[in-house]
Amino acid sequence: MTVPPPPPKITVVVPKSAAIHSATVSAPTNIACIKYWGKANTHYNTPINSSLSVSLDQCDLRAVTTASASSSFDRDRLWLNGSEVLDVSTSKRFRACVDGVRALATDKIDPNTNQVLVSKADWEGMHVHIASYNTFPTAAGLASSAAGYAALVAALVQLFGAKESYPGEFTAIARQGSGSACRSLYGGFVAWRAGGAKADWSDSIAEQVADESHWPEIRAVILVVSDAKKETSSTDGMSTSVNTSELLAFRAKEVVPKRMQIIEKAIKAKDFDAFGKVTMMDSNQFHATCLDTYPPIFYMNDVSRSVVQMIHKYNEWAGEIRAAYTFDAGPNAVLYTLDKHVVELLALVLKYYPAKSNDFVEEYVSSESLAKEALAFELDPSLIAAVEKSCRVHEHGDVKMVYCTKGGPGPQTLDPSESVFEFKME
Ligand code: DP6
């Protein structure tokens, strides 16, 4: 698959003498192994349980955001994927991020002369312009809001030279944009501690459990089952679940605390068996709470369920856990595996969820080299016999594309040439 070029820059005309301050960053998406579902406090956007995710490599999937400030801007403005979002200045999520980071701004100093170029008070008087794009389908259950709000907060931190007053404060701001965004501010394996002991919820923050170099063998194979916008947003879905599902309350209180311990131990020991099992069980329980919600919410579809069956047959055949599925608020399957099994897993995926033809496999799979290796890989006939019992060869199109990726770092500062804006002096 060829990486799409960045979209055209957003052109903004500014007065000739205007000073524009800008920062551009990219941020990863993250896929939870232990799911966040349900808010304890809607004002602070805090969860009823802790959660844990893997931040994914930014080669294929990332959000890129430029944050700019100038005293010549007459209002706050935001562009997402090339289109301006109107009335953004009254959006609670947007305000929480912009005002939250700006409150931590520091003076911008000229390193040569030591003179204050922009004081903290100056920042307060400026409006911001923000432009952001994703390199993957928005709202398809690929955590685009997580990457987007993490990139927003990280870009604002750079722009304002913001400093935390306690560790994790930026993540507390990002979670007010979107809960899962707090986990995208770090790379590798990241926990979001539910918090709640402090009245202002300043203990509801993300923490890195291990960075991306700790377990570099982890791979993620993502089957994009639908790239359409999802029917029930996470925010609405979890609100109905909190109000109606007794299973969700039980899960938050009794199940997740134990699973957080299990998964953190598994990550530290690089124990894929334990990591994979708890990941699959937690995905299943999250979707069970969706079914237990009244009226019920369905995020997985028949294709998603067939992937679940295929993975269980695969693991049973192998006599160990070689792949683990997880599904967010949508039908896409994220399969975690290890480097040594990724070609076999991809070969299995390509057999049961084929490309239009082998000639089109480069358009279908994000990594051309892995796709070629997988096509040349001979699956064990006994594995095919085992899988065939419960999984049929699907029509092309049931899976729209396959991303092969891995864990990766947190937000990255990009060169000014990668700015999403082009400011034209009038
Ligand atoms: C199923 O973070 O999108 O992906 O806080 O309302 O913006 P809001 O919700 P959001 O919910 C993500 C839910 C999930 C599970 C997870 O990522 O932990």
Image (cartoon, rainbow, N blue to C red):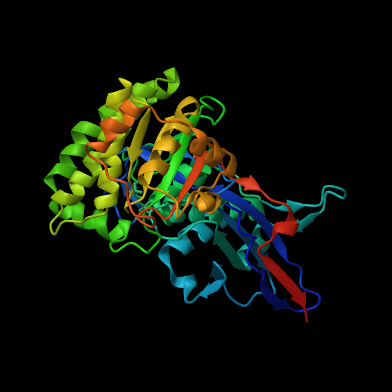
- Taking 92 as reference, is 375 left or right? right
Q: Farthest residue to the bottom: give it.
A: 426
What percent of the width, then of the height, locates residue 45? 35, 52
- Taking 320 as reference, is 80 left or right? right
Instruction: Indicate whether 232 appears above or below 424.
Output: above
- Pick whichever, 105 or 220, lies toward us: 220
How many marks do you count on the picture? Answer: 0
Displayed quadrant of residue 74: bottom right
What percent of the width, then of the height, locates residue 122? 67, 63
- Taking 420 as reference, is 396 left or right? left
Residue at horizontal 22 percent and vertical 39 percent from the top: 390
Question: Which image quadrant: the C terminus?
Answer: bottom right
Residue at horizontal 59 percent and vertical 65 percent from the top: 130
Instruction: Indicate whether 90 appears above or below 391.
Output: below
What percent of the width, then of the height, locates residue 270? 44, 20
What percent of the width, then of the height, locates residue 182? 45, 46
- Pick whichever, 197 or 298, lies toward us: 298
Instruction: Indicate whether 11 appears above or below 98.
Output: below
Q: Farthest residue to the right: give it.
A: 113
**Residue 278 in sight here:** no
Instruction: Indicate whether 40 appears above or below 381.
Output: below
Residue at horizontal 25 percent and vertical 46 percent from the top: 305
- Pick whichever, 277 or 120, lies toward us: 277
**Residue 42 in sight here:** yes
